[in-house]
Image (tube, rainbow, N blue to C red):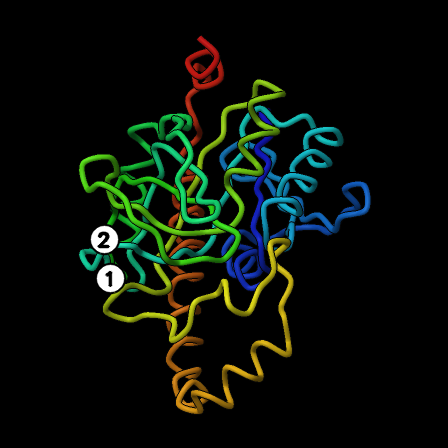
Amino acid sequence: MQTIGLIAAMSKEGNALLRYVKPWKRSAIGPLRGYNFSISNQACVLVTSGMGIRRASEACRILVEVISPQILISFGIAGAVDADLDIGDVVLAKAFCRLEHGALSLIQPLADWPDAAREAAAQALASRAARLFAGTVVTTSGSQTFEYKLGEMKHPVLEMETAGIARVAAEKGIPLLSLRAISDSPRAPIPFDLGEVMDEEANLRVGNLLGLILRHPRIIGQSRQIRLNTRIAAENAAITLQAILSRAFPRHLEEKFNG
């Protein structure tokens, strides 16, 4: 039985998956709280890292050291850069890069999603009136503003963890897959730049947030829609991942990734 390590940043993302993979059991993964379940003859272990590259990297390193997974999957919500993605659409990432100080790093490949996984994902999303895309994950410390050439990326999405997880996965020679559901987009934006209210370690700057609300009180009224969009995205990410895990990954994936 192969073992798959699953990493989500926030509890709302992890809890959404746990609702679809019962029964599961809690376990200690070093200092982290883990959740164990089996699906399609695969042992799966889920941990929640917390937001940000550093936390994701540390959680991944602990997970790898404790359970020695054959595959790693980073999943959760993300923001769409382009307006062609709708709330709840899901992106199976083919590559990732990092956005730091307004500049993009080299785009690097991730492991290929098996055909069976893509088919399962598309079928699961059809019942949710959502769509499946292949795309690029852009890991940022919070900033949502940057410039890029359209030809360099396909369906880019912004999140805060995959680059940190990828660093550990590459060191250990473990294939990494990344799945993100859209929680905000140019047509349904977060009403402020996350870089204004978070530091580089993804910690909330409470004073900055309060100051922003005082200057722009409409943000309070917009928070309900933000919460709804986040819930839709977390649910779609979970439903998609559960459908994918229900179809066993081909055994040649690890050799394909390393070869």
Residue that numbered label 2 is attached to: 131
* 58 in relation to 203, above or below: above
Q: How many residues crowd mark 1 within 10 Å: few (<14), some (14–19), many (20+)?
A: many
Q: Amino acid at mark 2?
A: Arg
In which quarter of the view is residue 10 placed?
bottom right
Marks 1 and 2, how far apart in space? 8 Å
Which residue is painted at 40% across and 27% down in the image? 108
Query: Looking at this view, is 152 or 71 the one in front?
Result: 152
Tell me if label 1 and label 2 are in contact, CB under 8 Å: yes
| Residue 20 drawn at (x, y percent) | 49, 56
Q: Could you tell me which quadrant the C terminus lies in?
A: top left
The disc label shown at residue 103, or none: none
Query: Looking at this view, is 247 or 207 the one in front?
Result: 207
Q: Amino acid at mark 1?
A: Asp
Residue that numbered label 1 is attached to: 86
| Residue 28 drawn at (x, y percent) | 79, 46
| Residue 234 drawn at (x, y percent) | 44, 61
**Disc 1 versus disc 2: nearer the observer:** 1
* 2 in relation to 58, above or below: above
Which residue is painted at 31% across and 61% down in the image? 88
* 231 in relation to 67, above or below: below
- Which element is circle 2 on? loop
Left or right: 149, with 56 as reference point: left
Q: Earlier in the sequence, mark 1 or mark 2?
A: 1
Residue at the extreme top: 259
